[in-house]
Image (cartoon, rainbow, N blue to C red):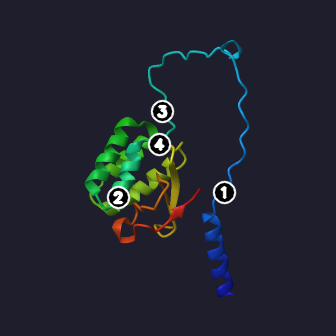
Amino acid sequence: MKRIALALLVLATLARCAPTPEPPTTPLKETTPDALPPVPVPEATAEPAPSTTLSMHYIDAAAALAVDDLEKAKTSLAALANESTGELQKLAQAAADTGDIAATRERFKALSALATTMDLPDGYSVAFCPMYKGGSKWVQKKETIHNPYFGKSMATCGSFAN
């Protein structure tokens, strides 16, 4: 029974690694400027709308944690907090205000739970480590895994979630 469960786990992991086929694209219809509807101009507001695209400061913090560079991670997290609003700002500042790398990583997990729901920059993807605190996600460039939760001790632990 244990061998069957192990075999199923291995097959499920390998299936997730298989490339997914891209859907066929349809050619765009040519349009003339006269055929386009007018674009409404938004009214000026006192506060800019919060960005829905994840900041590179988050990406820099993840990369710094992956190589155990606490000071660079804290600098990037503080910069993220300074440019953000709401819950993202609060979580980034909490992660920046820690005293050691273990606490920073724990607060980075809470920040990442929000960050992984945002629009990602091109070429970036959500990664997942099943071993850190019951499973933890983060965002990084879609290439070799660089685990921010274990740093150099388990640098490639994890896989891409999508």
Q: Position of residue 131 (x, y in %)?
A: 48, 70
**Residue count near mark 1 (Cα–Cα under 10 Å), binned few <14, some 14–19, many ≥20:** few
Whole-number angstrom distance, CA of label 2 to CA of label 1: 30 Å
Name the mark on residue 65.
Answer: 2
Q: Earlier in the sequence, mark 4 or mark 2?
A: 4
Whole-number angstrom distance, CA of label 4 to CA of label 2: 17 Å
Question: What's the residue at 53%, 15% (across, down)?
Answer: 43
Name the mark on residue 20.
Answer: 1
Q: Position of residue 32 (x, y in %)?
A: 68, 16
- Of marks 2 and 1, the one in the foreground: 1
Left or right: where 65 falls relative to 55: left
Q: Is there CB contact under 8 Å for labels 2 and 1?
A: no
Q: Earlier in the sequence, mark 1 or mark 4?
A: 1
Q: Disc 4 residue type?
A: Leu
Q: Earlier in the sequence, mark 3 or mark 2?
A: 3
Q: Is there CB contact under 8 Å for labels 1 and 4?
A: no
Q: Nearer the viewer, residue 146 or 46?
A: 146
